[in-house]
Image (cartoon, grey):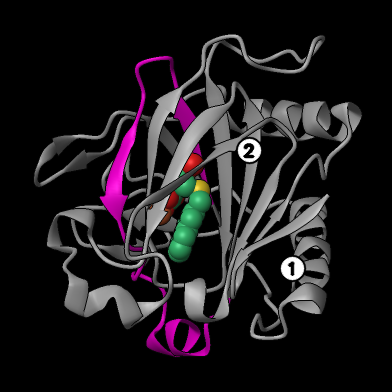
Amino acid sequence: RLQVLQDGLVLLRGALSLDVQQAIIDEIRELGLGPSGFYTPETRGGSMHLQMMCLGMHWDPLTNQYSTVRSNADGQPVPPLPPALWELVCAAAATASEACPSIPDVMPGVCLANFYTHGGRLGMHQDKSESADSLRRGVPVVSVSLGDACEFGYAAVRPEDTDASQTALGGAAKARTVRLESGDILIFGGPARMLFHSVQKIFPNHRPKGLVLAPGRLNLTFREL
Ligand code: MD3
Ligand code: FE
């Protein structure tokens, strides 16, 4: 169930049992209930089409920086990242780097939880708010998909900038899509770390039977700053 999509980009399909998926959802729900939970982030371009909650450190899309308080939400301290979650992430990254030696080890200190309702989406972007050293070494970002499936897009260059001269840049100059289902883990490390990526659409009610989660998709991305 391990697929190498390109060097540094590994998909672990069906990596999590239904019980583990539900346990993660319940843990996130517990942290996200109450006053210090999910919020809709504002960017300079307007509101994002998702709800977010950060664990470990807070990511602020207005400054593109990490902080110890929820600077663009309620100013409260950021909840800690539960150790059981980062252990699971280290294990997934180790499995991926066996298949792709270009992926270094990761000690994730931060998790961004994104919740997409059925109209939710995320435009093409790169993640480069982490430390210059982490980006240079290609320390992986690890994504865990839960709930409804989505169409995920990725490309080596911003698709509107694509031209023939750039096709040498990493094998995915043309945008590609892959469907991500509940329980899938995706690892982006080594040369895949700076890929552009997007969430194009959510497939309503495409989820494992018995999973308890509000209608929509919950994605967790784990990062080392
Ligand atoms: C590729 N989240 O939080 S996860 C994000 O499904 C983000 O919520 C999406 O993009 C989501 O920034 C996509 C997959 C992902 C996350 C981070 C990456 C892919 C990545 C960083 C570098 C390259
Ligand atoms: Fe991203």
171, 95: nearer the viewer: 171
Residue that badge 1 annotates? 93
In the image: residue 22, left or right of residue 200: right
Q: Residue at x 60, y 9 (%)?
A: 205
Q: Position of residue 194 (x, y in %)?
A: 39, 72
Q: Is residue 59 above or below residue 206?
A: below
Q: Residue at x 41, y 73 (%)?
A: 130
What is the number of callouts on the image? 2
In the figure, residue 140 lies in which quadrant?
Answer: bottom right
Q: Give the alpha-carbon distance from disc 1 to disc 2, as whole Å.
A: 15 Å
Q: Amino acid at mark 1?
A: Ala
Q: Which labelled disc corresponds to residue 145? A: 2
Q: Residue at x 36, y 24 (%)?
A: 120
Q: Which residues are magenta?
A: 112-139
Q: Residue at x 83, y 68 (%)?
A: 95
- Crowd class of label 2 (few under 14; some 14 to 19; many from 20; radius 10 Å): many
Asked if residue 119 is among those painted magenta in the image, a careful observer would answer yes
**Does the beta carbon of the residue at mark 1 sit less than 8 Å from ligand 1?**
no
Pointer 1 or 2: first along the chain:
1
